[in-house]
Image: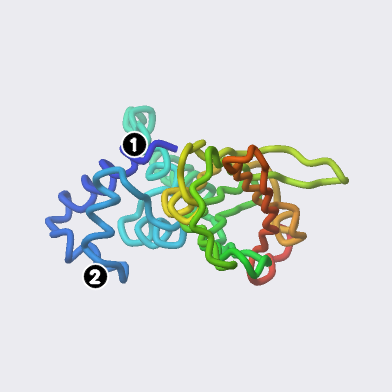
Amino acid sequence: MNQDKIGNFIKSIRLENNLTQKEFADKFGVTYQAVSKWENGKNIPDLAIIKQICDEYNIDIDEILNGKKKSKRKKLIILIPIFIILVVAIIILLSNKDRDFEFKTISSKCSDFKITGSAAYNKDKTSIYISNIEFCGTEDNEKYTKITCDLYENRDDTRRKISSCKEEKNIKLSDYLKETKINVNKYTTSCKTLTSNSLFLEIKAINKENKTITYTIPIKLNDSCKQGK
């Protein structure tokens, strides 16, 4: 998932509709500064907002996540009137397949960490976006020699790494978490698997004495899944 491509795509949508950053922001209940960060590739919208943008401008979620519009060349060359209804039906079916996403809020069950994020899923795939991780435990001003963060799935007593954050050196834990975001696109699991608390974050901080402090943070998906997903 390329944040620069996503930002340029959102900017093109805004300009095509002759909107200022503030006007665009007001549509989705955010600040114009947030829109500016999206367009400059410094951040991306939560998946819930991405879905609102898709609904508002009649585009597919994959177009935003991939940062480009789908080619319609093959659809346009079919001009025989007898096939018009069939072509329209195919376009609608393909569009619904990509946009038929359910959105749930991601949070943490660990009292020492506050997590903000979203999961978008349909019957074919799941995308995960964690936009904020905040340490709420005892104040920690130590500057660690190295900090890493990994997202794991625990299934059948076997854990599998599905994403990693950027490693940082000589940094405080709070400063590291401010810049830490996790994007997992087309993660092949079901909503029911997510709600079983199979996902967890593992943060490792190495101090000056070369001692490793490990935080294991269980992740939960708020609310229940729709039947069959």
Q: Are marks 2 and 1 in contact (CB under 8 Å)?
A: no
Q: Residues within 10 Å of mark 2 (few under 14, many from 20)?
A: few
Q: Is residue 191 left or right of residue 4?
A: right
Is 207 above or below relative to 96? Answer: above
Q: State the residue at coordinates (67%, 65%).
A: 110
Q: Residues within 10 Å of mark 1 (few under 14, many from 20)?
A: some
Q: For the C terminus, which image quadrant? A: bottom right
Q: State the residue at coordinates (53%, 55%).
A: 100
Q: Quadrant of residue 184?
A: top right
Q: In the current view of this chain or complex, which residue is farthest to the front?
A: 209
Q: Is residue 141 left or right of residue 16?
A: right
Residue 29 point in image, percent of width and height: 31, 71
Residue 164 point in image, percent of width and height: 57, 38
Q: CA distance from mark 2 to mark 1?
A: 24 Å
Q: Quadrant of residue 1?
A: top left
Element type where label 2 sits in the image: helix
Q: In the current view of this chain or complex, which residue is farthest to the right?
A: 156
Callout 2, which amino acid? Asp
In the picture, the disc for residue 68 is 1
Q: State the residue at coordinates (26%, 41%).
A: 8
Residue 214 point in image, percent of width and height: 68, 49
Q: State the residue at coordinates (43%, 52%).
A: 175
Looking at this view, is 152 or 67 the one in front? 152
Element type where label 1 sits in the image: loop
Looking at this view, is 71 or 36 the one in front? 36
Residue bearing the label numbered 2: 26
Looking at this view, is 28 or 207 the one in front? 207
Residue 226 point in image, percent of width and height: 68, 66
Q: Is residue 138 left or right of residue 63?
A: right
Please state the total of marks drawn on the protein image: 2
Q: Nearer the viewer, mark 2 or mark 1?
A: 2
